[in-house]
Amino acid sequence: MLQKILLVSVVLTLFYVEQNSAQDDLRLQAILLDSTLTKNANAIVRSEEVTIEIKSINSVVVKTKRIVSVLNKYGDGYADCCEYYDPNRKIKKLEAIVYDSFGKEVKKYKKKDFKDRSVSDNSSLVRDDRIKYFEYTPLNYPYTLAFESEVENSTTAFIKYWKPILAYRLSVEKSIYKILNPSKISIRYRETNLDEYSVETNKSNLGTTYKVFNIPAKLPEVCSLPLNDMIPMIKVALNEFSLKGVKGFAKDWKSMGKWQYENLVSGRDKLSETTIEKVTELVSDATTTKEKAKRIYNYVQNKTRYIGIQLGIGGWMPMLAEDVDRLGYGDCKALTNYTKALLKSQGISSNYCVVWRDSDKINIDSEFTSMEGNHVILNIPDGDKDIWLECTSQTLPFDFNDSTTDDRNVLVVKPEGGTIKRTKKYEPEENILHTTATVNLEVDRSMSATVKRVSQGLEYDWNYNIQFETSKDQKLYYKEFWGYINNLEIGKINLNDNKDDIKFTEDIEISCVSYAKKVGSRLLISPNLFSRDQINLPKYDTRKTPLVISRGYVNTDEYIINLPDGYMAGNLPEKKSIETVFGSYSYELEKIDDKQLKFRRFLKIVDGTFPKEKYEEYRNFRSEIKKIDKSRIALKQQ
């Protein structure tokens, strides 16, 4: 009887091993794939399992096993497997195997075969983080990559999030995320969009497991939500943690801000008496807090420059203010802390603020506390208003949030604790581009003009950087910007950056040898020379996501058009106006006399999030604007 039981046990074991092996073999093949996963996909995550074991507040181990089938050259990026390391983060295991479409091994990479380099960038003086990676150039598609790694980190302030969908055009056959917490450290979770993807959740005394299966590839849609807002995601954070050897505790933003202030910011604002005397003299005749702060901000801009410092805790702790003062450089943390110290020397209170710097308005999550942000800015409360300073920039005006820090949550770090505050949101009426021009049309079809563009608000941010380009590149920029004008030539360019009023003015002389089109005895011209809407929004059979207009603005235009000798305008079109929930538009031509026309245009776009059903209405709105903008009128001989 015992022999029979042993025999059955061996058979079942062999069957189980054989079955699992067969399943692995199928995942290593890339010729038999589910059509629902290949549709619209450049690559498929066949299997991914991330296991995170929290051993203590000083140790977290992340084990990763991933199999990805790459379907075409656009999917190669999903097979670029790598791991980062530094003095606190050790790579214990690292290997990868490439298989052809039939599951036959092509190349194997052991840890020693991975390339090794510093994680450098052009703005950092020094960094201590490095990366191990491999490069594979495929000869044929599809192919499959199997990757496995194990990394131990003594910094536990950052627990790897679960984002099974990393990008558009990437489908997922299976993804598993496990959190093991044998040390029973207090842990917090933030779960988003799980129901929409039928995520399986299993919670036990040992930890928590999340699983998801068979997610088709998502296609990007213009003017939509960020991908992270639409995918399943698990954020994890420990109440007790370690950051580069510094122990921390945070269960909410108040305690997180207090910990950051006491351990990262406090006591680093000492300045020499010589510097304090110099700054005191600088602001001696300033009568308001705002004017004093402005002079100090300009002082910092003229004295310092940005250089990244990313060594150990220095990646999160600012340099000493006196070192920045002596050396004349620092990163965002250092320059913000330095400016804060200078303000403090004059009795002006300010707040060190952590923010996500990005043009997509990524927010500090007000509902979930963790180590967040990639940048630091300064906040000065001034009565019932806030002054915001971007201390890393040598060019931005005082109290101006550009489109990388506007309208988003920041963590305000204070001695009494942290709070979440919102940076300035610019309303459409504040983001103004006003274009005026005098246009001269000639009998030989040529055109010359003087153009003035005045930008304010975020329009300032979108335009002012042209002043830092070479004269050659400036001319190329305007030729491309007005690329719908054939044979355009750019003459004199005069740029004026009024930082006090945050107003940028462009005066440009242009000419064109063949602007008008001759048809018989008539000349055809497009009165809108300099502000034609070039947006071309795609049509979707079935829109999947809400319509998002991230920032509103107002563009106004007014031109005087001098007609060629011997020509006059025929009947002019009636004024055209469009009113929608997304904004408004008007186009108008007025005859001043037989020799002159006046052109006026107004466009206001309103920011906001609208139901997906509204997208087609918005697309039609922009299409109609584009159509009207390029419309022509006929000039007839007198």
Image (cartoon, grey):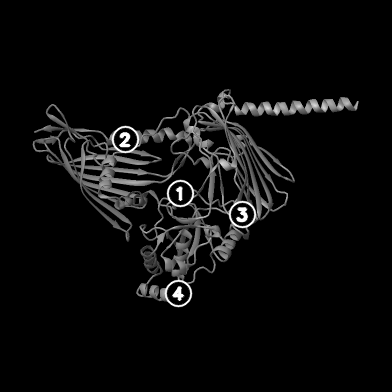
Query: Residue 92: x, y in percent?
Result: 63, 46
Which residue does the image show at 22% across and 34% down from the upper left? 573
Q: Is residue 509 visible?
A: yes
Instruction: Give the numbered dot on residue 155.
Output: 3
Compute the Cα span from label 1 to label 3: 25 Å
Choose the circle earlier in sequence order: 1 or 3.
3
Residue type of the residue flagged with mark 2 = Lys
Query: Residue 433: x, y in percent?
Result: 31, 48
Choose the circle earlier in sequence order: 4 or 3.
3
Which residue corresponds to mark 1?
Answer: 358
Residue type of the residue flagged with mark 4 = Ser
Compute the Cα span from label 1 to label 4: 35 Å
Query: Residue 565: x, y in percent?
Result: 9, 38
Viewer-proximal residue, 479 or 416? Answer: 479
Choose the circle earlier in sequence order: 4 or 2.
4
Viewer-proximal residue, 260 or 623? Answer: 260
Q: Secondary structure at mark 3?
A: loop
Compute the Cα span from label 3 to label 2: 53 Å
Compute the Cα span from label 4 to label 2: 60 Å
Compute the Cα span from label 2 to label 1: 29 Å
Of badges 4 and 2, nearer the viewer stands 4
Residue type of the residue flagged with mark 1 = Asp
Which residue corresponds to mark 4?
Answer: 272
In the rendered view, tell whether residue 43 sits above or below residue 583: above
Which residue corresponds to mark 2?
Answer: 626
Instruction: Give the numbered dot on residue 633.
Output: none
Judged left or right of residue 567, residue 382 is right
Judged left or right of residue 300, residue 376 is right
Neighbour class for label 1 at 10 Å: few (<14), some, many (≥20)? Answer: some
Viewer-proximal residue, 376 or 152? Answer: 152
Compute the Cα span from label 4 to label 3: 35 Å
